[in-house]
Amino acid sequence: MSKVKLPKPRTLLFPMPAVIAGSIVEGNPNFCTIAFCGIVHLDPPMISIECSANHHTTVGILENKEFSINIPSTSMVEVTDYIGIKSGKETDKSEIFDIFYGDLKYAPLINEAPVNHACKLTKIVELAGTRELFIGEIINSFVSEDCQTDNAPDIERIDPLIYATSNRSYFKIGENVGKAWKIGRKYNKK
């Protein structure tokens, strides 16, 4: 198989989640769409998001040291993109969603999103330019009841929205191709 060297390094990681980060800014819930989000640690559970200092949501994260990560379903594609297009500096996003809270009072959670995490900010990593990586300990996790099978989160029912930086488009998860820690037992190098 031949390879093509790209003109410059790219952040090509598939799939890439499209999440909605939330914070309280000047007493109001605010949200922004984030594609640079990832799991950092298992115990304690930790997650990271990369934000610009220009994001209005960043102001609330820095002020209150709390934030939320809301995982939208594909049915939320329009509102998720809207949240990313409109700045909270000019648009009041506090009434777009039905909001609830877990144990953290500055981490607004979106009821319409099938998965939610309330996070306490634990570390800030300065990145190039005006970007920062926020690492948060997940204090609460919520999953919509109808997105579970046998009392466990079901990825097909959650139907998470994913993003591809390569063509700036949203996608959905495909079919199950194998059971982890099991299918590899069938491997036979030919």
Image (cartoon, grey):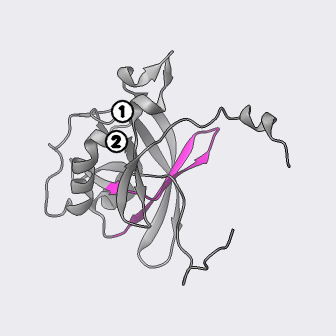
Q: Residue at x 30, y 57 (%)?
A: 57
Contact flag, marks 1 and 2 (Cβ < 8 Å): yes
Q: Secondary structure at mark 2?
A: loop
Relative image position of residue 44 (x, y in whole percent): 61, 39
User: Judging from the image, what secondary structure is the residue with disc 1 in?
Assistant: loop
Q: Residues within 10 Å of mark 1 (few under 14, many from 20)?
A: many
Quadrant of the frame with the N terminus: bottom right
Residue pointed to by mark 2? 72
Q: Is residue 189 above or below residue 88?
A: above
Q: Which residue is mark 1?
A: 114
- Number of disc labels: 2
Question: Extreme top residue here?
Answer: 150
Q: Is residue 51 magenta?
A: yes
In the image, what residue type sits under mark 1? Pro
Looking at the picture, how far across and down is residue 106, in whole percent? 33, 43
Q: Can residue 108 be seen from the camera position used here?
A: no
Which residue sits at x=37%, y=68%?
A: 52
Is 36 one of the magenta-colored residues? yes
Majority secondary structure in the magenta region: strand
Question: Residue shown at 20%/59% (left/top)?
Answer: 88
Q: Nearer the viewer, residue 66 or 49?
A: 49
Q: Nearer the viewer, residue 24 or 38?
A: 38
The part of the chain drawn in magenta is 33-53
